[in-house]
Amino acid sequence: MAQQQQSVDSGAEKALLAALARTDESIPNSLAFAKENDLDHKVLSGVIRSLAASELVLAKDRSEQKFVLTKEAESYCSQGSSPEVQVFRCVQESSGGITMTGLKDKVGPQVAGVGFKQAMQAKWVSLVKPAPGPEAAAPPPPQPEDRAGKPGQKKKKEPKAEPTIVASCEAVEDACLALLLKVKASEALAPKDVQGLKKRKLVQAVKTAFFEVAKGPKFALERKQLATDLTREMILGDKPKYVDLSFKKYNFKALAPIPLGGHLHPLLKVRTQFRKVFVRMGFEEMPTNRFVESSFWNFDTLFQPQQHPARDAHDTFFLTRPTKSDHAKWPEDYLERVRKVHEDGGYGSLGYGYNWKLAEAEKNILRTHTTAVSSRMLYKLAKKYEADGNKFTPTRYFSIDRVFMNESIDRTHLAEFHQCEGLVADYDLSLAHLIGTIEAFFKNIGLHDVKFKPAYNPYTEPSMEIFVFHPGLGKWLEIGNSGIFRPEMLRPMGLPEDIKVIAWGLSLERPTMILYGVDNIRDLFGHKVDLEMMKTNPLCRIGLD
Ligand code: PHE
């Protein structure tokens, strides 16, 4: 194959160089040259480019505009006449004229439509209106039912009679076909004719590129092989070879390959914008660098009972190594208060009335929600309150990071995803504050219609699911969960009764899927993600308006 190509190339090269050697003029059109010499213009162009790089020839880029027939025009050429002539003949052949319906039957709807219009313009044919029939002149007397005013008995309309097309001259000339045949033979047309054919969409312009070629400064009938790299062998010895060698010129204009850069995943872009929204609203980011968490911080401190189904291996990933966290790391007095609130209650609560087990709390898991982080941070806040002499600093916290659930994977569920969480801690916060804050947050991320539905969480009371209206899908989507943290969670930490904490959480994937129009979560996140999507996904416009 390669050898065959080489001989085709060298044939073209020889023919071109020989032709240039015979004259001092340039070869003005490589296309014409290729045609005359029975060469493939593509091959010839390659040869010209490479000869120009070695300066054997000088090549100038040229281009010309040519007109070619459209498919429609091709069909008229093969039918042997233009549509207007086909129509004229058909009209002439049918004695007494023909209706449009009849014409369509004979020559087909396209030729009938186009041809009739052209033939009318050329005044080859004309229309004769049907003579009014007796019914048209005098409408029939109304039927007795009509007079009685019976409803639903409308008179049927007579179908309108069609006008007849008749010939207005004896013979016509097919000027259109003559022009089309000229185009086909690449003959020149008058500009007005080209305009006419273009308007009728019978020709279209195509631009063809070619070269004008002349002898170059290093013109020769045969090309010397050029060296590309200077090698050790070329410069060694008393008579180094490089002196007699010709080297290929560097092409500084050659396009270099585009270096592979990093690209941001849509989730990261949305996360950045969410982060900006939180920061703008005065929230501070919580440290979330702890994927492995103890059940204590993930569940127990959140007043989630140890028999709760979410703490089952079906829902939660348990670690095999290390299986346990050492409870010595947890403040002992706090641990005891957590045990007590689960077993006996307190702070106005009855508790769950079961035997709380330290071993259960020690089990290591992959955190199932970032609320584990919120719990740790709220405990710290309670400690600070104590250290500051019972002076509380109102706080707004947020986090956006990964969580893990032992879910079966489908279009909308993954075993690991991102959670976006916000909380506000202050004196006397109410449900109205929670609703207002969530609405403000969602407005800032571009979701203006928010609805709430009562829900249940072990750690919040009241609790509300958050729904947003998706204008694209035209429906309400559940997007998050929220609530006011229970006294059973906050009081054992040491926070006083009148400090309330409102909080909410949502997945980062859901809004990202809405924003980026992804309907299968596996196309967004995980090992099946299309890397091309990573390179081409657009900016996240949230917060940019
Ligand atoms: N932890 C909840 C979840 O995983 C979200 C939430 C956070 C709910 C804070 C209420 C308060 O969906």
Image: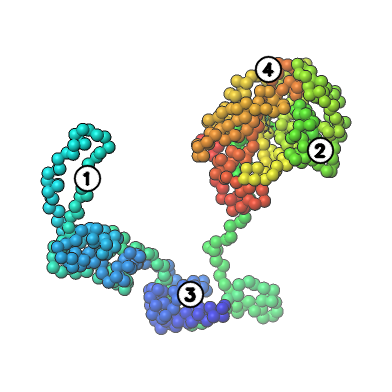
Q: Give the residue at x 69% y 38%.
A: 401
Disc 4 marks a residue whose amino acid type is Tyr
Q: Label 4 belongs to which residue?
A: 427
At mark 2, the secondary structure is strand
Circle nearer the N terminus (4, 1): 1
Instruction: Check disc 4: other Cα within 10 Å, few if <14, some if 14-19, many if 20+.
Output: some
Q: Amino acid at mark 2?
A: Asn
Ligand 1 lies in quarter: top right
Q: Decide if residue 276 is on the left or right side of residue 193.
A: right
Q: Is mark 1 within 8 Å of ligand 1?
A: no
The answer to whether mark 4 is within 8 Å of ligand 1 is no
User: Closer to the camera: disc 3 or disc 1?
Assistant: 1
| Residue at x 62% of width, y 43% of height | 412
Q: Position of residue 307 (x, y in %)?
A: 79, 31
Determine if residue 180 is in view.
yes
Task: Measure the alpha-carbon separation of dots 4 and 3.
Answer: 82 Å
Q: Is residue 153 above or below residue 443?
A: below
| Image mark for residue 364 | 2
Residue at the spot of label 3: 43
Q: Mark 1 highlights which residue?
A: 157
